[in-house]
Image (cartoon, grey):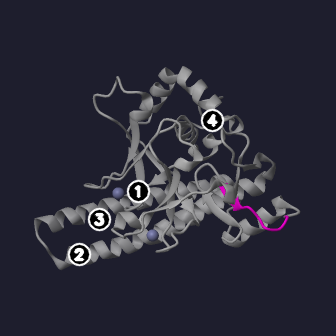
Amino acid sequence: MEFFDFLFAGVAAFAIKVAPKIIRNTVETIKNELREIFPELSRTYSESRKTVVVTAKEIGEIDEEIQEREKSLRRGDNNADREQIENLNREKQKRYEKYQEAQGQCIRNQYEQDPGKFAKTELENGDENKLLYHTGLISLGKNCPSCGRLMRLQHRTVDNPTFNDFFWQCTGYYEGLTCRTFSFRPSDIDLVNRTDLNELSVDNETVTTIAKGVQGSIDRRLKVHLGEKDVDIVCPVHKTAMELKERRGSDDLPILDRFYLRCTHQGCSQTTKLKSFPQVAAYLQRQEGKGILF
Ligand SMILES: [Zn+2]
Ligand SMILES: [Zn+2]
């Protein structure tokens, strides 16, 4: 990860560190670096994507078994359940590693198939949509400087987040570790993202203005997916795909306060809110192959 700063799974985007030396052929350099991190490659993107979907489903099934055992434990403490939970957690961790590998292969597949569909941007004010689009997604290879666990890119809940509102959050925080947040500095990176997605080819204001004009249709489209799992947004604690929910009795609420993804593990309070229109567009793109500006 020397050259990359982080990679977002789902709809591929990644950040490369602003290089101290001039890179003559960025495309070849990116290809080589991706090959080094993800040496295995499926024949096609759709094959790697299928592995993502299948492993996410398997993780969900293992987690359901764990929940059954936890229920049984609550009825009466016993060693058999405890041992089985340990085994299942180990199995789940193995699947999660396979899932992450497949997410990486998806990025490599997409880039190798058509590097021309990607462009490098220096993030400047007005480009916030390019980051907002990827919030909530797991990041590959962005490790916490104090405990080594993966981190998630988040932003403060404000109306129009600027780059200063973004920060990294260690997933170990949810396991009770004391490490919490780390600042995000856009000047350290160049973002490489797909150019064939309309929401990434215009500025943040344009996405937001257009989206505000079609809120009724966005609302109807999101409602169709209530209860569905989003394989790219996983609970940082349970590694299970989160499910789309709508706040109850909320028909008067603005659309950005209403929909969120939630972990399905009983008692888990992990959520990922859909807090910006670029993020909603990315959600719809993943579920329907179409965003908001099409
Ligand atoms: Zn940490
Ligand atoms: Zn959870």
Proximity of marks 1 and 2: CB atoms separated by less than 8 Å? no
Q: Quadrant of the N terminus?
A: bottom right
Rounded to the nearest whole Å, what is the CA distance between mark 1 and mark 3?
A: 15 Å
Residue tagged by mark 1? 235
Which secondary structure, mark 3? helix
Q: Does label 3 point to a residue whose CB lies under 8 Å from ligand 2?
A: no
The image position of residue 24, as x and y in percent, is: 88, 63
Q: Does label 1 point to a residue whose CB lies under 8 Å from ligand 2?
A: yes
Range of residues picked out in magenta = 14-22
Under mark 1, the amino acid is Cys
Which secondary structure, mark 2? helix
Rounded to the nearest whole Å, what is the CA distance between mark 4 and mark 1?
A: 27 Å
Proximity of marks 1 and 3: CB atoms separated by less than 8 Å? no
The image position of residue 15, as x and y in percent, is: 67, 57
- Residue at image position (57%, 63%) is 140
Q: Marks 4 and 3: which is nearer the front?
A: 4
Q: Nearer the viewer, residue 186 or 243?
A: 186
Of the numbered discs 2 and 3, the one sitting upstream in the chain is 3
Of the numbered discs 4 and 1, the one sitting upstream in the chain is 4
Which numbered tag is attached to residue 66?
Answer: 3
Q: Marks 1 and 2: which is nearer the front?
A: 1
Is 254 located above or below residue 271 in the figure?
above
Rounded to the nearest whole Å, what is the CA distance between mark 2 and mark 3?
A: 10 Å
On the picture, is 60 further left or further right than 132?
left
Residue tagged by mark 4? 204
Under mark 2, the amino acid is Arg
Of the numbered discs 4 and 2, the one sitting upstream in the chain is 2
- Residue at image position (36%, 27%) is 253
